[in-house]
């Protein structure tokens, strides 16, 4: 029986972009199913005590820029640290991924094109026409996918993903959840890979230190 990873992320997240290809490689190598679960990060942060980027202390904002450069080099990527169309209204872009899954298709090809479009080509993922064109480029029926994404079913799944994320201790993007164990951040992919390889039982947060005996 194949194992499943719940993949929580948003197209707004540079870290999801940086980690997407290596994550998909890990999933393929271990023959695990991926449950694509895009979430609205603004609500995730609000529900779990995080802050939007603009509200973080300047020290944290500066360190983030350094980390982006490090990981850009580490992953062998070339992208703009401050792309022209970022931030953008992300809801429809995220719901396009839900729509692809609802249509019974694999969102991976669309995601790769969309991440490259935003971070490398500086295309506007807030533009419905751009999203439809990217779906077409991914070999999908872009108009049909866009129609589903703009409908109530995709909206409902988007809300459920948020509820599941917060209920499952997810607080940022990307988060990879294997049998209830959360691996937050693309810099935890090696740990996820190790967990899949060893097939160990999941670690839980409800571990209490031993009594001191005093």
Image (tube, rainbow, N blue to C red):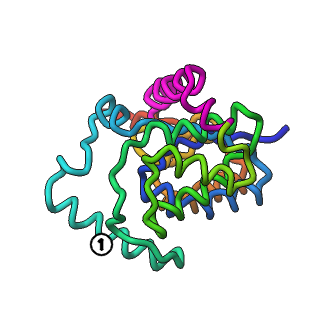
Q: Residue furthest left?
A: 58
**Residue 36 shown left or right of residue 86 in the figure:** right
Q: Residue at label 1? A: 66
Asked which quadrant contains residue 144, the reply is top right
Closer to the camera, 186 or 98? 98
Q: Secondary structure at mark 1?
A: helix
Q: Is residue 125 above or below residue 89?
A: below
**Residue 23 shown left or right of residue 204 in the figure:** right
The x, y position of residue 99, in whole percent, is 64, 34
The x, y position of residue 156, in whole percent, is 54, 21
In which quadrant of the rendered image does the C terminus lie? Answer: top left
Closer to the camera, 208 or 97? 97
Q: Residues within 10 Å of mark 1 (few under 14, many from 20)?
A: few
Q: Residue at x 43, y 55 (%)?
A: 124
In which quadrant of the rendered image does the N terminus lie? Answer: top right
Region of the chain picked out in magenta, as a range: 144-169
The x, y position of residue 116, in whole percent, is 53, 64
Q: Residue at x 58, y 43 (%)?
A: 7
Q: Is residue 59 above or below residue 132?
A: below
Q: Is residue 175 visible?
A: yes
Counting labels gives: 1
């Amino acid at each position: 029986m194949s194992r499943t990873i719940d993949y929580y992320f948003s197209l707004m997240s540079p870290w999801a972009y940086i980690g997407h290809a290596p994550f998909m490689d890990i999933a393929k190598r271990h023959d695990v199913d991926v449950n694509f679960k895009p979430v609205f990060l603004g609500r995730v942060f609000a529900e779990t005590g995080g802050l939007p980027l603009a509200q973080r202390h300047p020290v944290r904002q500066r360190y983030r820029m350094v980390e982006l450069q490090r990981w850009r080099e580490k992953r062998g990527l070339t992208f703009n640290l401050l792309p022209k169309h970022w931030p953008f209204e992300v809801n429809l872009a995220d719901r396009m991924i839900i729509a692809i899954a609802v249509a019974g298709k694999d969102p991976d090809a669309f995601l790769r094109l969309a991440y490259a479009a935003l971070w490398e080509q500086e295309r506007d993922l807030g533009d419905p026409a751009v999203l439809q064109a990217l779906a077409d480029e991914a070999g999908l029926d872009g108009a049909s996918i866009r129609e589903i994404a703009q409908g109530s079913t995709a909206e409902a799944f988007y809300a459920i993903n948020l509820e599941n994320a917060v209920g499952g201790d997810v607080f940022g993007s990307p988060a990879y959840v294997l049998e209830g164990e959360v691996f937050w951040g693309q810099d935890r992919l090696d740990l996820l890979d190790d967990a899949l390889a060893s097939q160990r039982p999941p670690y839980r947060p409800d571990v209490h230190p031993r009594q001191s005996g005093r």
